[in-house]
Every structure is written in structure tokens, then in C-alpha cells.
Image (cartoon, rainbow, N blue to C red):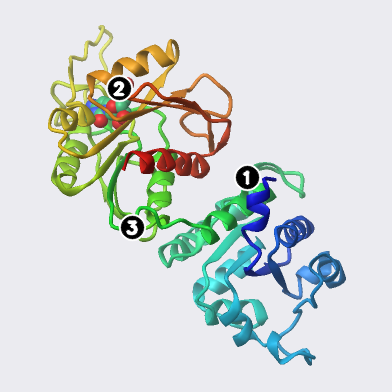
Amino acid sequence: MEKTNQQSLSDKIIVLGVSGGIAAYKACDLASKLRQSGAEVITVMTSAAQQFVAPLTFQSLTHRPVITSLFTPIEEWEIEHISVAQKASLAVIAPATANVIAKIALGIADDFLTTFVLATRAPIIICPAMNCDMYANKVVQGNLQCLRGRGFHIVEPEEGMLACGDVGKGRLANVETIFGRIRSLLCARRDFEGVKVLVTAGPTHEHIDPVRYITNPSSGKMGYALAEAARERGAHTILVSGPTSLPSPAGVETIRVDTAADMAKAVFDKASDCKVVIGAAAVSDYAPELAADQKIKKKPSDFTLKLKPTLDIIGELGKHKGRRLLIGFSVETRDLIENSLRKLKSKNLDMIVCNDVTQPGAGFATDTNIVTILDKKGGSEQLPQMSKLQTAHRILDRIHELL
Ligand code: C5P
């Protein structure tokens, strides 16, 4: 880890909430990492968590007594739930079980951890970990959605082999990812304060008839990460999103659209007073010339669909650019740099983020990305594989230089 990062948490008090899942053992690693980065770590364990890992483990790693109950007699008055709530710089619950997530969503306060959550005003990161079917359950997803809407930060679990033997999404996020999220929240720069940023994200649906459309595999994750990062850094952020299954990021004005034409309208409505416009959406380049009112019936003969080009949203903004910064994205399967430089010029962009979707760990539906940033002055920066949120921050760093 870089030295600057190690020093960056030295004046922070982090409450580490550990609930009762097998991933509790991974929280030991997180506790150790936080402590090594200079933070003071106060561990709060639910009673189920103590069945998996002994409090003594966390006590040894953090050099502090561990809070195991609301009612244990305490030596220091300071470790009372209100004072902990007031002095916490941030809280991270890792792993967060379905039970703890549900209690927090409902405002139940029947142990130290959930009481603390109600009492604190510190930012809270929730890192769910559970069996994949439990994670996919609508109740759990509904509770997470509700928490997101209330400003909780969710670090999604990863896909893979679970302790129970099932394979799916539910494994606690990598400790590095959780640590990165903690650092980005605690060390958030407010360098976009007073700047209005518009981000487009996701695919578009171009309707053929009421039951069919043309689209692409864009998940919207990169654009949503950019919107979240811009908001974190103080920007007034507008997200114009095509159809995705992602929840609207808290604190971001999100406008949901369906077709390229809808997206163009929403962007042109909102872009006039935006200082920065980032086109991360995978807008369809063509739409059916006519969408049929009724379902087109199957016939044994060939079927030809006539397509017409859609409006190039970012390209249109490039024609009347003013003092606005325009950032485009480029997805290519070959000659990435040459094609992207051509787009940078023809669309009158300040910067283009190139994405080679053929590489593993890059592209549409993944949680990570590998991009090269090109700017109109001839600058080029190749970023290593990193989470989409980290990539978003690196892109914003470059935009900030231009601002
Ligand atoms: O030309 P190409 O579609 O490859 O360019 C990609 C860039 O242009 C992306 O930033 C994308 O959001 C934007 N774009 C757009 N409207 C379109 C097509 C692409 O804003 N109709």
C-alpha cells in the first residue's frame, strides 16, 4: 500500500460491525488493515458473530476492547453506544447478514450494533455476505434498496464459491474493495463542489414492436459509478439512465429513459447549465424506422427491418459546446486507440475513455474496468484493472485538471 494512504486514516475512528456469518473471519483481515492504516478501530460484534470468531481475536488486532453486548458492564464510560455513535468517523458492517440488514431497514435496535446504527450520524458502509439464494431474495434486495435510498453505502458481495458449497453472488466483497470504499469516503475530496455534472448511463431500447426491441449488454455500472463518485466529491449530479436494474444512487437527480430519442431529450433539457457532461451510455446507433403498434406475426418468409440512425447526443452537444467539458466513452473490439481518437475529434470532445471490451475484467457487465484515457491535447493514460468506482475517480481526477 502507498505511504500516503497508510497515513490517511490516522485521525479516524472506525466502528467495525461484525455480524454472524462465516465471513466474520474475513473481518479480522479488515480490522488489521484499518489498524495498520492508522485508524482507531472499535469492533462491535453481534452475539451470532461471537459464535464464529472470538472477540479476543479482534481485541488483539485492534488493541481495544471489543463491544459484545449492550448490557456488559463497561470499564470506560466512553464505550457507551451514544458516545461511540458520536465519535465515529465512519462505520462499516462486514459481514452484514440478511438479519442485520433487515433490522437496520426497519429501525430495530435490539443489540449494540443496531442501536449504534440508529444513533450515529457517521456514514455507514454495509457489506452483505450470505448464501446466494438468500441474497437474491426479494426481501433482502428490497431492504438493501431501502437502505441505499437512505444514504447507506452498500459494497455488493462477489460471485463465486460460497462456504455452503453453492456458487453464486453472496461472497463478502474483497477486503481491498471494502478498504478502498472506506478510504474514498473518509478521504473524499470536495473538489467538484459548485460544479454541475451530467452523466449518461446504460443501454437504450429501440422498439421494433410492443414486445421486441434492439439493445446491447451495457449494465450501466460505469455511468452509475461516475455519478456516485461525482456526488461524493461535491458535484450537483444528474444521471440520465437508460433501462438498467441498478438502484438510483442516493443524492443524485436520476432521470430514467427508454430510447435514444428519450435520452437525447432529457440530456438537451438538462445540459445547458452543466459544466461537465459525461457520455457513458451505450446509446443505440440505429433504431427501427417504424415501431409496429401490434406484435409482428411470424411468417415463413425472410423479414427485413429498416433502421435509421439515432441522433448522436454527445456529438450534438459537441456542435454547441461553449465552455462545457465533454467526455465520451468508446467501446471497440479492434483498433481501439485509432477509432477513439477519431471520435474525440469528430465529436469535439475534451476527453475520451477507451474500453477494450475483449479483455477479461473490462467492459459491459463486469464490476471492474480497464480503460485508457485520451485527451484532446494528445495526452494518454492507461489505467490498470480496478473497480468501476475507482476508475470513475481516476476519470474525475483528469476532468478536474481540465476544470
Ligand atoms: O460513436 P460511438 O457510438 O462509438 O461513440 C460513443 C460515445 O458517443 C459515447 O460517449 C456515447 O455515450 C456517445 N453516443 C451518444 N449518442 C449516440 C451514440 C453514442 O451520445 N447516439
In the picture of the structure, the residue carrying the numbered disc 1 is 158
Q: Percent position (x, y) of residue 197?
A: 29, 48
Q: CA distance from mark 3 to mark 1?
A: 33 Å
Circle 3 packing at 10 Å, graded few (<14), some (14-19), many (20+), is some
Q: Percent position (x, y) of residue 292?
A: 15, 27
In this view of the protein, which residue sits in the foreground, 198 or 161? 198
Asked whether residue 245 appears in the rendered view, the answer is: no
Q: Nearer the viewer, mark 3 or mark 1?
A: 3
In the picture of the structure, the residue carrying the numbered disc 3 is 193
Q: Nearer the viewer, mark 3 or mark 2?
A: 3
Question: Would the CB of label 1 be found within 8 Å of ligand 1?
Answer: no
- The mark that comes first in sequence, 3 or 2, is 3
Asked whether residue 267 appears in the rendered view, the answer is: yes
In the picture of the structure, the residue carrying the numbered disc 2 is 344
Q: Secondary structure at mark 2?
A: helix
State which quarter of the image contains the N terminus.
Answer: top right
Q: Amino acid at mark 3?
A: Glu
